[in-house]
Image (cartoon, grey):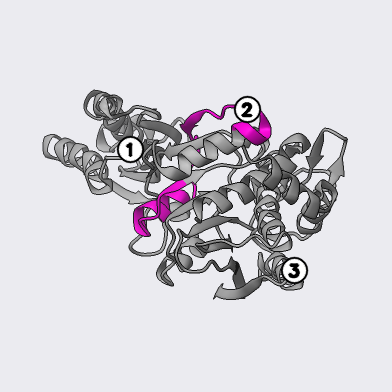
Amino acid sequence: MHANLISKLQEVIKEKEVIDFIGEVVKIPSYNGIDNQETEVAKCIHNLFTKEGIESELIPVCDGRSNVTAKIKGNGSGKKLLLTGHMDTVPPYDMLNPFELKNDGDKLYGRGVVDMKGPLVCMIFSMIAIKRANIKLSGDIIFAGVIDEEEKSLGTIDLIENGIKADAAIVGEPTNLDICVAHRGLEWFELYFEGKTVHGGAQKEGINAILKASNFIQRVEEKIIPEIEKETHPIIGTSSMNYGTINGGTQPSTVAGECILKIDRRWVPGIKYEDMVKEYQDVIDEISREDDKFNCTLKVMDVSIMKEGYVHEPMEIDVNHPIVNITKSLTEEVFNKVPELTYFPAWSDGGLLSSYANIPTIVFAPGSLKTAHSANEQIDIKQIFPATIIYSLIATQFCE
């Protein structure tokens, strides 16, 4: 169907230059603690776009950290497509030579190679291919490399607050070239239970915060968990909750004066954030009315707090949206694989784009999420060049 166009694109870019540039950005550390964190990566990308004659801009966001954007303008009569992903990575932890790209012939290894500098480079070269092949579009194709997704998503929030507009977006988190049409929302809560510390030999004079936390957990199991299991989505399944950590007390012979419980709460599209928070506060209020010694405070964990006015909302797109259908047919044609329409198991900036910018969004990219953040982070080479061609073809078809 698109054999001539595919051949044309394959003539103007080569797999080796895509892989080489992945190595260029992997060798630039961009994890939390690096001065200006992602900006050197942004400059590297900006310089490549400029060299290729593609309009590009470095956009300062905060603390010396910059997004990078690029655009190939259409004639103004077509749809706009946004290709986007984050430039930050998690730290190298115990990874051996994390910023040296290793190639064993089947896979590339290095920090950020799949999460998500590899997919970003595929997006970048998809635009370079369109430019080199002198393919004229009706609508704009826009690239945005953003900061801070691993922390508070300040880069994508900045895009939104600067008025990003598109008719569809693709977030390049790794999906093994399946199409993720939804994901859950995410919040991390901390519950602080205040008791009264006394010697264990006089425990009736104290208030055991661990026991109060246990009472709360039992009530959650009775009141909230059944409701969570009723929150269903045809592709995602159910909402979820996990008791992550619990810490309280100082020693066996002392009544615990405080206890801290941390939970992970994820909710499917259609559930309101405020209603979800209220469920926990209602349980706290209910137990407080029954027990005047129950003292519990609910808060969002500091690491989960986003900029005021934003939360980790879920993502969802109509499975019959043109960006879904186009991506599906082109992936089958180029990669000889019928992609699964599925959900992304983690959270992504797609939740912000779809919820706050009203941009229909999918998550779609080469590589497996399973090795992200690990000491063995990797991406399958066989997916890299096809993904690059697929992104180019999506743009030529969607931006008509």
Of mark 1 and mark 2, the one earlier in the sequence is: 1
Of mark 1 and mark 3, the one earlier in the sequence is: 3
Assess whether mark 3 and mark 1 are in contact (beta carbons under 8 angstroms): no
> What are the residue bounds of the magenta stretch?
332-361
Disc number placed over residue 106 in the picture, else none: none
Q: Which residue is mark 2?
A: 337
Q: How far separated are the C-alphas under marks 2 and 3?
A: 31 Å
- The amino acid marked with disc number 1 is Ala
x and y, in percent, of residue 327 in the image: 54, 40
Of marks 1 and 3, the one in the foreground: 3
- The amino acid marked with disc number 3 is Glu
Q: How far separated are the C-alphas under marks 1 and 2?
A: 55 Å
Q: Secondary structure at mark 2?
A: loop
Q: Residue at x 30, y 42 (%)?
A: 195
Q: Residue at x 66, y 62 (%)?
A: 33
Q: Which residue is mark 1?
A: 209
| Res 242 visible | yes
Of mark 2 and mark 3, the one earlier in the sequence is: 3
Task: Characterize the local packing of mark 3: few (<14), some (14-19) or many (20 or more) Cα atoms within 10 angstroms.
Answer: some
In magenta stretch: residue 255:
no
In magenta stretch: residue 345:
yes
Q: How far separated are the C-alphas under marks 1 and 3?
A: 63 Å
x and y, in percent, of residue 32 in the image: 64, 59
